Amino acid sequence: MPQRAIEAIAEFYHLIQYLGPFSGQVNDLQESSALRTKEAIASELKVPTATITLTEDVTVGCNIAMWGMDWRGGDRMLLTDCEHPGIVATAKEISKRFDVEVSTCGVMATLNQGNPIEVIASAVQPTTRLVILSHILWNTGQVLPLAEIVKACKSVNSNVKILVDAAQSVGILPLNLIDEGLTSMPLRVINGGADQKAWVVYMSVRRREKICIPPLLVGGA
Ligand SMILES: Cc1ncc(COP(=O)(O)O)c(C=O)c1O
């Protein structure tokens, strides 16, 4: 982590201790800094601030989008064979709890030949409710053409939602979240140095309005 980021975190903790950790003043300060962070990220990504949520990491961002669907028994979820292990584990858990069928399509084999758009879209079925793919594949480095994949999947099933794991791509590739028609995109914002990160989930305003995850734990100071 860059020295400036370490110092900023330490300064904020000192200020919290000085003002009183559970004071109204600290609460306001935390809320206003979180809002400023979201505004800065939203302006960089050219999306409304209301579409940005700060998260602990990319896996949590994916979990929010995945558990936020109102799954019904018999629904299907489609993953590529290059998704990160945390996302695969979440898909398995959702499958167990809600009787959702998880299938996998093979994009790894399209690294040097073949067409990932066709591979993914041909695996979409009428009952597929969520397609999960990564913008840059973590294991092979292949870049998937998002806009074309979204268009091809929606032409098979217009109701399908697309979750793009952008852990590897933000700050490296240009993104046009709104025009590309993505439903949700957990991402790691890298700004300046390689390790200066913020974890974020982008969720389209329409999608966000429908997300409702009952809390597992309630209460606490
Ligand atoms: C594509 C992809 N998804 C998810 C993750 C997990 O990220 P995190 O550790 O922020 O949850 C990684 C980690 O590098 C990744 O490359």
Image: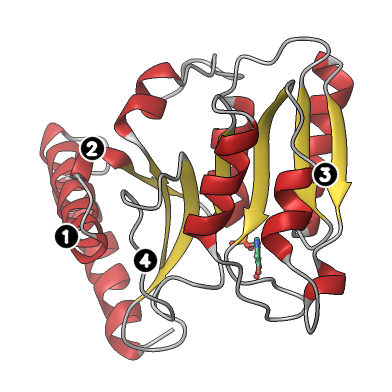
- In which quadrant of the rendered view does residue 70 lie? top right
Q: Residue at x 63, y 27 (%)?
A: 67
Residue 43, numbered circle: 1
* Mark 4 secondary-structure assignment: loop
- In which quadrant of the rendered view does residue 204 lie? top left
Is there a contact, CB below 8 Å, between mark 3 and mark 1?
no
| Residue 36 in the image: above or below residue 122 | below
Residue 89, numbered circle: 3
What is the x, y in percent for residue 182?
45, 45
Who comes first in sequence, dot 2 or dot 1? 1
Residue 50, numbered circle: 2
Q: Amino acid at mark 2?
A: Ala
- Mark 4 CB lies closer than 8 A to ligand 1: no
| Residue 83 in the image: above or below residue 3 | above
Q: Could you give the CA–CA distance between mark 2 and mark 4, rounded to whole angstroms?
A: 18 Å
Is there a contact, CB below 8 Å, between mark 4 and mark 1?
no
Q: Could you give the CA–CA distance between mark 3 and mark 2, rounded to whole angstroms?
A: 29 Å
Residue 87, numbered circle: none
Q: Horizontal placement of 167 versus 8: left or right?
A: right
Is residue 86 among the parts visible in the rendering?
no
What is the x, y in percent for residue 151?
52, 47
Q: Amino acid at mark 1?
A: Ser
Is there a contact, CB below 8 Å, between mark 4 and mark 3?
no
